[in-house]
Image: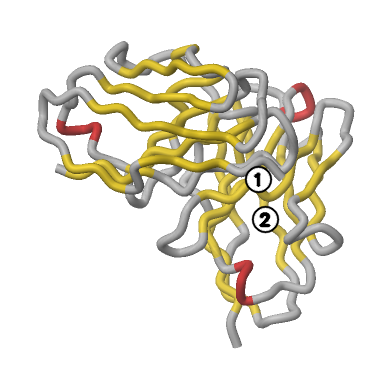
Amino acid sequence: DIQMTQSPSSLSASVGDRVTITCRTSQIINNFLNWYQQIPGKSPKLLIYSTSTLQSGVPSRFSGSGSGTVFTLTISTLQPEDFATYYCQQSYLTPYTFGQGTKLEI
Amino acid sequence: EVQLVESGGGLVQPGGSLTLSCAASGFIVSDSYMNWVRQAPGKGLEWVATIYSGDSTTYADSVKGRFTISRDSSKNTLYLQMNSLRAEDTAVYYCARRLTFGGQGTLVTVSS
């Protein structure tokens, strides 16, 4: 199985900050890397797929990059509604594993 | 507009069975690969199963042989048949069209 390691596990930030979350995979996944946002009590929301493609309707302050086995999600200017938990997921090989999550707190 | 509505969760004893449904609208379930993903209380996301456009299926090792993913084109609905349930299957179960979730999930609690 492909192991996914997210860092940090939690992050404190303020409105207006720029934050970056990193996801490392245990093997090459040909950029089949997706990012989700989850607010408590809600289903996960797809933000970015295929490493850097912004899902329709997602604000442009979210961006993704990376290659090989290291990928990042960046939020350029934090807004109050961005405080949530973020997950990376690889969709290259089954099992389609998720990272353990990064909780972004005020 | 694409919509997914999960249902069928509830309390079941260990060893019991349950079938989850995911009613879809705005697209045809047989035209897309569909997934089930679960989240144990207070934990992260775990992929459970996928059914592809050609009806081939794949499962997480933790559910292989116990769970079956299927779909009914006439009802435009995705299913997850769960047998031999264990306490560790307790979770909110979400369905997803490709990479996109849409419903609120359905809670399965396995307990005596």
Query: How far across and down, in percent of the image, does residue A103 sit?
Result: 31, 46
Task: Between residue A17 and residue A5, name the one nearer to us.
Answer: A5
Q: Give neighbour class at mark 2: few <14, some 14-19, many 20+ (Cα, 10 Å).
A: many
The numbered mark, 2 or 1, whose residue comes first in the sequence reads 2
Chain ID, mark 2: B
Q: Are marks 2 and 1 in contact (CB under 8 Å)?
A: yes
User: A53 left or right of A82?
Assistant: right
Name the quadrant containing residue A30.
top right
Residue at (42, 18) in percent of width and height: A64
Badge 1 element: strand
Name the quadrant containing residue A67.
top right
Task: Between residue B105 and residue A32, name the one nearer to us.
Answer: A32
Residue at (17, 27) in percent of width and height: A79
Mark carried by residue B36: 1
Mark carried by residue B47: none
Task: Between residue B74 and residue B50, name the one nearer to us.
Answer: B50
Query: How far across and down, in percent of the image, does residue A26 sit?
Result: 62, 37
User: A23 left or right of B74?
Assistant: left
The answer to whether B41 is drawn above or below residue A44 in the figure is below
Query: How far across and down, in percent of the image, does residue A45 sit?
Result: 43, 33
The answer to whether B50 is drawn above or below residue B38 in the figure is above
Q: Residue furthest bottom?
A: B112
Indicate which label's residue lies in the foreground, 2 or 1: 1
Query: How far across and down, in percent of the image, does residue B93 sit?
Result: 57, 53
User: B86 left or right of A43?
Assistant: right
Q: Which residue is mark 2?
A: B20
Q: Give neighbour class at mark 1: few <14, some 14-19, many 20+ (Cα, 10 Å).
A: many
The answer to whether B11 is drawn above or below residue A61 in the figure is below
Badge 2 element: strand
Disc 2 to disc 1, how far (Cα)? 10 Å
